Amino acid sequence: QSEAFGVLKSEDVFPNRFEPVDRTKLLSMFPKIPLPSKNTYSKEFVASYYDTDINSHVNNAIYIGWANEALPLEILQNTRVEELEIQYKQQVKYGEKVTVNIEETSPDNFLISLNKEDGNIVCLIREKRV
């Protein structure tokens, strides 16, 4: 065996380039989304087969669709989403009922909660439209 080749170690090929994540700093970058304090708009949905994945859980993107579908048609036709924050709290399964509650905190700014029949929060959304 030639001395020119030596032995490669995994850390030579794949050095650890990432520092450990400080979860407290990460969480402080994303402040909690408050619950709507009043319902400007509200709408109920039932999780259908086409809303779910292979595990019968509603796909996360469906929550955003439900939230926007609960807004009046005039808002949907005349504005678009500029910013959206979402905090997922709980899964929804096929057949479960979900109520979308929306508070318009100022023109085109919304706090949205999706809640199961038992009152548990599915997710919270803060949305800005233009």
Image: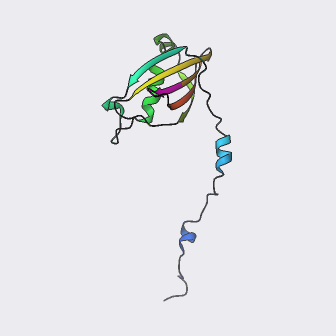
Q: Main secondary structure of the magenta part?
A: strand
Residue 26 position, x and y percent, is 65, 45
Count of numbered tags: 0
Find the residue positioned furthest to the left: 49
User: Is 52 placed left or right of 70 in the picture?
Assistant: left
- Which residue of the protein is positioned furthest toward the bottom in this rendering? 1
Is 70 above or below relative to 115? above
Foreground pick, 9 / 29: 29
The C terminus sits in image quarter: top right
Q: Residue furthest front?
A: 118
Where, by quadrant of the figure, is residue 57 drawn?
A: top left
Q: Taking 56 as reference, is 10 above or below it?
A: below
Within the magenta stretch, is there residue 116?
yes
Report x, y in % for residue 4. 55, 84
Q: Is residue 110 magenta?
A: no
Q: Is residue 1 left or right of residue 95?
A: right
Name the residue at 54% across, 19% down.
102
Q: Is residue 49 above or below residue 22?
A: above
At horizontal 58% and vertical 65% (from top left) the residue drawn is 15
To which quarter of the image does residue 127 belong? top right
Query: Bounds of the magenta span?
Result: 113-118
Q: Position of residue 83 (x, y in %)?
A: 58, 27
Query: In the image, 126: left or right of 64?
Result: right
